[in-house]
Amino acid sequence: MDRRIDLIAKALAKKRLTINPLDDGSGVVLDVEGEKLLTMNATGMTIIQAIEDGAHSVGAIARVVTSVFEVDDAAADQDVHAFVENVSGQLK
């Protein structure tokens, strides 16, 4: 398990991060402890939801992304890596 993904998963489980989806597929994630509001596009919401649902590797999350969006595996992997790096970096 990627430690950055694990960090996000633990923050979700402990309710430090709360997911608030919007009707258009985007949403916001509130970092209660860090007092931050993270805006997410539909891809970000799909990734954060996949982590909350138990996906704990870049590959597993990228498979969810490719099943929802018309994107190739390499682009999905890149998106997941960038997202995980960004969100986990804000949790420190």
Image: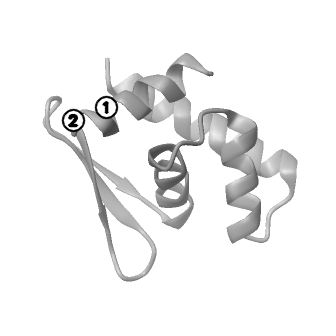
Foreground: 58 or 70? 58
Label 2 residue SS: loop
Percent of width and height locating residue 59: 76, 39
Name above or below for residue 90 compared with residue 22: above
Residue ID for mark 2: 16
Number of numbered callouts drawn: 2
| Cα gap from disc 1 to disc 2, whole angstroms | 5 Å
Q: Residue at x 69, y 35 (%)?
A: 58
Foreground: 41 or 67? 67
Residue ID for mark 1: 11
Q: Residue at x 66, y 33 (%)?
A: 57
- Amino acid type, mark 1: Ala
Name above or below for residue 22 compared with residue 13: below
Q: Residues within 10 Å of mark 1 (few under 14, many from 20)?
A: some
Q: Residue at x 65, y 34 (%)?
A: 81
Percent of width and height locating residue 11: 31, 31
Percent of width and height locating residue 88: 43, 27
Q: Residues within 10 Å of mark 2 (few under 14, many from 20)?
A: some
Q: Is residue 56 left or right of residue 38?
A: right
Q: Quadrant of the N terminus?
A: top right
- Amino acid type, mark 2: Arg
Name above or below for residue 11 compared with residue 79: above
